[in-house]
Amino acid sequence: MAATSTLPHRKLGNDGPQVSAIGLGCMSLSGVYGANDDAATPDFIRAAIDKGINFLDSADLYGFGHNEELLGRSLKGLRDKVVIATKFGQVKTATGMGVDGRPAYVQQACEASLKRLGIETIDLYYQHRVDPNVPIEETVGAMARLVEQGKVRHLCLCEARPETIRRAHKVHRLAAVQTEYSLLYRSEAEETLDATRALGIAFVAYSPLGRGFLTGQIQSQADIAGDRRGDHPRFAGDNFARNRDLVGQIVAIARTKTCTPAQLVLAWLLAQGQDIVPIPGTKQLTRLDENIGALAVTLSPTELAQISAAIPPGAAAGERYPAGAMKAVCL
């Protein structure tokens, strides 16, 4: 294995781990955005580690266990080189998908994830979605017992609203909160950031490239044919054209900076604070290199203001998820 490159690092929370300033979202390794080559994944993961990425984000939902199993196989002999995050709580039901935050399920889900990952301790354990039928204090209390048992190092939440974050943090210190955050999704994310920042909790930004929209590579709905983005309102009908026009302004600014649009928007996000760690997802080495290249892009205060003004909060057209999924976020 080649020597690992050094990237800038950021700390997750007051007592959490140091992680590469850009992490790797692993969801796409389980066929969410087109088919994946499982046989090629170990080499891809090793290459990411060689390039300095040490923060890998998975979930038991991704491929319903497939993602964790694949990650476990890919990390044989490399456990000490990575910070592993995974999530629990989204479950299949008779009518589709649901959320389970019951204490008994917390224990069950963690033990299943540990087995699939082939590790003894999960570095960051997230409740993937807040269960509206179980007080957050009960769920986080059960998660805290996992820390006492040595099965989890740090606790985190996903898609939790500020009041839920504050209640959870009183039960057990949170290292991070993960929420979608990009130029296309700002208003609620920045409200969450105000809450995490006040408590010394890191903000892990998923979909920082707007599910690919902000790369400037998606010009027609044919570019997303066959994957789940076709069900997302921001990629549908008139919303698509409106959002593509917004992204066009980012493409123009990136051209003047001689960087790619993806690098520009990641650099903008990184510049919002040292407590923010974006985790763009990809399964392509060229995209991985492009994302890492964002760390070399410097933006002046004037440029940051110009980028912010190009897609101001609330400018994006359409919700970020289909109606059913929107009911499970910001709880």
Image: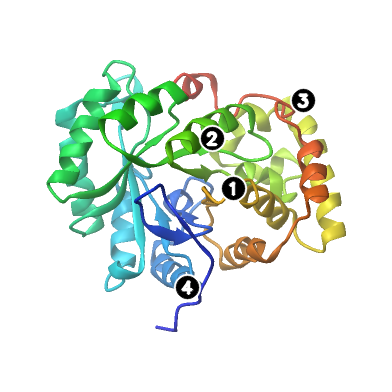
Q: Nearer the viewer, residue 42 or 266?
A: 266
Q: Residue at x 29, y 23 (%)?
A: 136
Q: Residue at x 29, y 69 (%)?
A: 80
Tell me where residue 230 sits by quadrant: top right
Which residue sits furthest left?
A: 149
Q: Position of residue 164 (x, y in %)?
A: 39, 23
Q: Disc 2, disc 3: CB below 8 Å?
A: no
Query: In the structure shown, which secondary structural element does the residue marked by tag 4 occupy?
Result: helix
Q: Which residue was labeled with disc 3? A: 238
Distance from Cα at disc 2 to Cα at disc 3: 30 Å
Distance from Cα at disc 3 to Cα at disc 4: 39 Å
Query: In the structure shown, which secondary structural element does the residue marked by tag 3 occupy?
Result: helix
Distance from Cα at disc 3 to Cα at disc 1: 33 Å
Q: Which residue was labeled with disc 2? A: 193
Q: Disc 2, disc 1: CB below 8 Å?
A: yes
From the image, which quarter does the N terminus lie in? bottom left
Question: What kind of residue is marked 3?
Answer: Asp
Q: Is residue 130 left or right of residue 272?
A: left
From the image, which quarter does the C terminus lie in? top left
Q: Residue at x 56, y 41 (%)?
A: 227
Q: Is residue 284 visible?
A: yes
Return the disc, 3 or 4, that comes first in the chain's sequence: 4
Q: Residue at x 78, y 42 (%)?
A: 247
Q: Is residue 179 left or right of residue 272?
A: left
Return the disc, 2 or 1, that comes first in the chain's sequence: 2
Numbered tag placed on residue 47 in the rendering: 4
Question: What kind of residue is marked 2?
Answer: Leu
Q: Position of residue 144 (x, y in %)?
A: 20, 38
Numbered tag placed on residue 273 in the rendering: 1
